[in-house]
Image: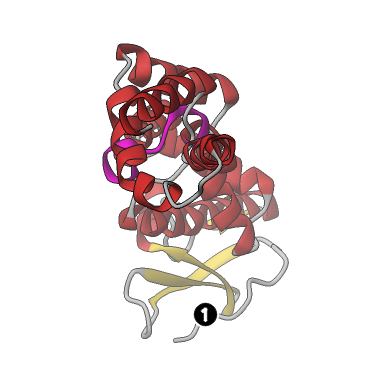
Amino acid sequence: MEEPSDPPPQGGEITKLEVQKNNSDRVSVFIGGEFAFGVHQDLVLKHRLHAGRTLTPDEQQAIVEDDRVAKAKARALDYLAHKPRTETEVRRKLRENAYTEPVIDAVVERLHELRYLDDARYAEQYVERRFASKGYGPVRIRQELRKRGIDRHLAETAVDDFFADQRTLPTAREKAEKRWPRIAREDDPRKRRDKLYRYLKRRGYTYDTIRVVIDEMEAQYE
């Protein structure tokens, strides 16, 4: 059966439990012969629901809230199944699905316990992927992490640790070499420097790295 909206909790004696026709994972709970609320089957066992048991309004409300958390957790896990996400992204997704902040807090806490959410690990992996796939420098990657809701300290730590071995300079050289044929069409040396600077800056390289690369390019081609 299709699960209607849960009415306000009234409490009373459970008269029937019925597996829902459209979703065998959920059970409809009837109190006094009337539909009272729906829950996941796991919560039937957790809260020891059975015909003949009497629920207070507070007990019924607690079960309904527990079910909302379970629904939100399932939604979050489905969202996480496609690719890693940050805590901020998960919270935003759950808000889009109209879950309340207490429910979202409970889900996020549980996901951290299960290690499905780990912003520090996410930041480390993100830095590696963006550098490997795009060759982006530390400035740009740090900005991207912040846009995804990563804490400033975590973003800086992940970026600084990854780039501590000066691996950006060879990549910046490679990018400049590929870009140079287009920049070389400019006759004015000052404008060539400026164009190369802006190009490398957009890709997230620091001033010190860009300065070294520009000096090398000028020495090689001019």
At mark 1, the secondary structure is: loop
Q: Estimate the x, y position of residue 184 in percent, counting from the top left.
A: 42, 46
Residue furthest out toward the top:
164
The image quadrant where one finds the N terminus is bottom left
Q: Estimate the x, y position of residue 198 in percent, counting from the top left.
A: 55, 40
Q: Residue at x 38, y 32 (%)?
A: 222
Above or below for 181 versus 210:
below
- Left or right: where 32 falls relative to 87: right
- Left or right: where 172 falls relative to 193: left
Report the span colored magenta. 131-140
Q: Estimate the x, y position of residue 152 in percent, counting from the top left.
A: 59, 24
Q: Residue at x 57, y 48 (%)?
A: 91
> Can residue 11 be seen from the camera position used here?
yes
Q: Nearer the viewer, residue 102 or 53?
A: 102
Q: Residue at x 55, y 19 (%)?
A: 153
Q: Estimate the x, y position of residue 60 in percent, counting from the top left.
A: 61, 56
- Within 10 Å of disc 1 (Cα), the crowding (few <14, some 14-19, many 20+) is some
Instruction: Quickly name the residue at label 1.
Output: 3
SS majority, magenta: helix
Q: Nearer the viewer, residue 58 or 95?
A: 95
Looking at numbered disc 1 in the image, what kind of residue is underneath it?
A: Glu
- Left or right: where 131 falls relative to 43: left
> Can residue 154 be seen from the camera position used here?
no
